[in-house]
Image (spheres, rainbow, N blue to C red):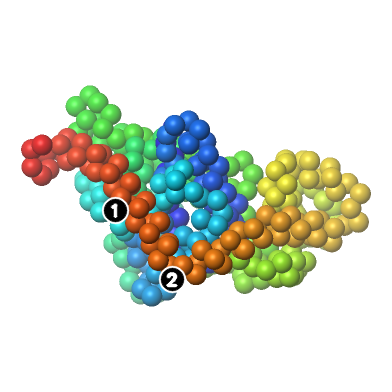
Amino acid sequence: MRIFSGIQPTGRKHLGNYIGAIRHYVEGQERTHTAGDLAIYCIVDLHATTVPYEPAVLRERLYDTAAILLASGLDPDRCVFFRQGDVLEHAELCWLLSSVTAHGDLNRMHQFKEKSAAQRELVSAGLFLYPVLQAADVLAYRATEVPVGEDQRQHIELMRDIADRFNARFGAGREVLVAPGHRIPEIGAKIMDLQEPAKKMSTTGGSGEGTLYVLDDPATIEKKFKRAVTDSENEIRRGPDKPGVTNLIDILAVCRGVTPDEVVASLADARGYGDLKAAVAAGVIELLTPVRERYEALRADEAHLEGVLGRGADRASAIAADTLADVRRAMGVGPVV
């Protein structure tokens, strides 16, 4: 069992990022460490260049993201943690895999359609090839499991197709690349905007009041949940007709480590949505306060962050280089080794 996942350094990390991805990184780190294998996590700065950005801001956000991940419990001694741009094998494998990736498959990617439609100027070729680089990120490490949100399911399916197509074309009967499986959490895979509960929480397309950030202080957290949109029924239950209430119940279930049904049962005597919102705010404050407190010290020491990322990159490159050697050999690229 080998886990790989990458996280964008763009934007401030919000509750949806934490619940849907970051906390699973820590859980995966412990599972693989116990099993004697590796969890491999990277901050995907190359992916961040596929849309308009400011270089100085990208650098700052990368350090922000690294500090949040470490503050959340990632341990560089128990996982491989690095910056994507430090490991050259990612870019090389992306190019080599483009030879077995169909143009039509890329053209059907939902994320490309959404992001390209939102671009007012240049729609980059990098945005189109984003899923190929994402496939290279994972396939370079022969990972068997990729923890993702529901919105990335299509990319994982393409990744598997690319691996299978490569093996069929160049494998000569052996599995050069490993087709990974995805791991989508049952609860919390998609945290919704607190003001627009039909939309996923986001730093780019969401509302300011509806996006709760990992580094928000307790007073801000309470304020945002107090103003969270619910409905006119005042009945605490889950359902497609109650997106705001369902979102709050799911968040509280994650905070407490229980099922949504158990949350609903615990609030049977609640006086209404006010009690639900207060309980969710308290749960989120308890969940995020330790992260916020550890973050401050970590973020202040950029030299330490660079050291952590550099050592992780050395470990990652050693693994990816073995895969690239096999890929090059199979494709007849480069010197005979």
Name the quadrant containing residue 275: bottom right
Q: Which amino acid does label 1 sit on?
A: Val
Measured as percent of width and height from the top left, residue 14 is found at 58, 62
Name the one closer to the observer, 73 or 240.
73
Q: What residue type is labelled 2?
A: Glu
Q: Is residue 159 above or below residue 308?
A: above
* Relative side of 212 to 161, left or right: right
* Relative side of 296 to 265, left or right: left
Measured as percent of width and height from the top left, residue 255 is found at 70, 50
> Is residue 202 visible to the viewer in this orientation of the structure?
no
* Relative side of 6 to 200, left or right: left
Name the one closer to the observer, 173 or 218.
218
Q: Residue at x 85, y 48 (%)?
A: 267
Measured as percent of width and height from the top left, residue 257 is found at 70, 43
Question: Which residue is the site of mark 2?
Answer: 60
Question: Which residue is the site of mark 1?
Answer: 87
Q: Residue at x 20, y 36 (%)?
A: 326
* Relative side of 81 to 337, left or right: right
Q: Furthest residue to the top?
A: 173
Measured as percent of width and height from the top left, residue 231 is found at 79, 60
SS under mark 2: helix
- The C terminus lies in quadrant: top left
SS under mark 1: loop
- The N terminus lies in quadrant: top left
Name the one closer to the observer, 106 or 248.
248
Q: Is residue 95 above or below residue 176?
A: below
Q: Which residue is drawn at 38% across and 53% down?
A: 82
How crowded pointer 2 is (Cα within 10 Å; few <14, some 14-19, many 20+) is rated as some
> Is residue 294 visible to the viewer in this orientation of the structure?
yes
**Disc 1 to disc 2, C-alpha distance:** 20 Å
The tag earlier along the polypeptide, 1 or 2, is 2
